Amino acid sequence: MSETIQFKIEGMDCGSCVKQIEAAVGAVAGVETVKVSLAENNATVSFDPTKTSKAAVIEVVEDEGFDVPA
């Protein structure tokens, strides 16, 4: 059963940022869907909790150079 999370992302300023985050998060094992909204500065991610975690997904976003406020 998949788990869906939504979180804010700071530091995005263009469509390339959206594509960069979607590609990086989409490459994480267990991630099923990724939708990043530039207008709302957030991401919605569905994943298999037996293969990855919210913390791992957020770490990937931060590794790409964006901030995820706590």
Image: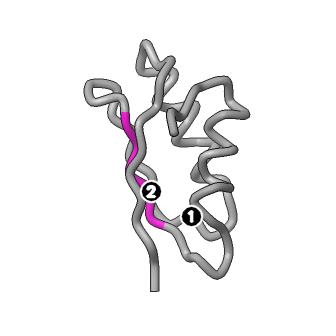
Q: Where is residue 36 in the image (x, y as percent from the top left)?
A: 39, 39
Location of residue 64 (image quadrant): top right
Asked if disc 2 and disc 1 are in contact, CB closer than 8 Å, the reply is: yes
Residue drawn at (61%, 38%) of the image: 61
Q: Which residues lie in the magenta part? A: 42-46
Location of residue 37 (image quadrant): top left
Residue drawn at (64%, 42%) of the image: 24
Q: Where is residue 42 in the image (x, y as percent from the top left)?
A: 37, 37
Frontmost residue, 68 versus 18:
68
Q: Residue furthest bottom?
A: 1
Mark 2 and mark 1 lie on one chain; the one further toward the N terminus is: 1
Q: Is residue 43 on the magenta stretch? A: yes
Residue drawn at (42%, 59%) of the image: 5
Residue assigned mark 1: 31
Q: Residue furthest right?
A: 63
Residue type at mark 1: give it.
Val
Identify the secondary structure beneath mark 2.
Answer: strand
Residue assigned mark 2: 45
Identify the secondary structure beneath mark 1.
Answer: strand
